[in-house]
Image (cartoon, rainbow, N blue to C red):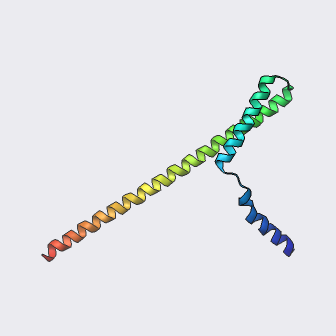
Amino acid sequence: MLKAIIGAIAIAFAAPAFAQSDTQKDIDNSVKNSVDDAKDKLHTDSGTQKAKRHAKKAARNTQAKARHTKNDVKNTTEKTANDVKDSTEKTANEVKDKSEKAKDDITK
């Protein structure tokens, strides 16, 4: 049982090393789509092979679109969070400056 736990932990730590980046996935999809397009131009495959290939291509394109949308949302969210943080810091600094100025005016 201990060996199984150690094996599971090893696999969990090794998994990120095998993960593909979004750019690599896009490149792989592009290559596969090019191959599928070339096969379509040859007109040498059966209807079932063609339908299967088209279904896989549609799934790849849908996954890529979802991946890009997810990244766009993530980037927009991060930008908005940074804008809010910057705005909050700016407002806090303005309030601090006004407070210090008022304090100086009172002490004079």
Q: Can residue 63 be seen at all in this image of the molecule?
A: no
For this orientation, the residue located farthest to the bottom is 107
Label count reads 0
Identify the residue at horizontal 23%, vertical 66% (top origin). Answer: 98
Identify the residue at horizontal 58%, vertical 48% (top origin). Answer: 71
Identify the residue at horizontal 31%, vertical 65% (top origin). Answer: 93
Residue 20 falls left or right of residue 76: right
| Quadrant (top left/top right/bottom left/bottom right) for the C terminus | bottom left
Residue 13 falls left or right of residue 68: right
Q: Picture quarter containing residue 46?
A: top right
Residue 77 falls left or right of residue 108: right
Q: Position of residue 74 (x, y in %)?
A: 55, 51
Residue 65 falls left or right of residue 3: left
Q: Considering only vertical position in the picture, is 36 above or below 7?
A: above
Q: Considering only vertical position in the picture, is 49 above or below 86?
A: above
Q: Picture quarter containing residue 57?
A: top right
Q: Position of residue 104 (x, y in %)?
A: 18, 73
Q: Position of residue 79 (x, y in %)?
A: 47, 52
Identify the residue at horizontal 51%, vertical 52% (top origin). Answer: 77
Q: Considering only vertical position in the picture, is 41 above or below 102?
A: above
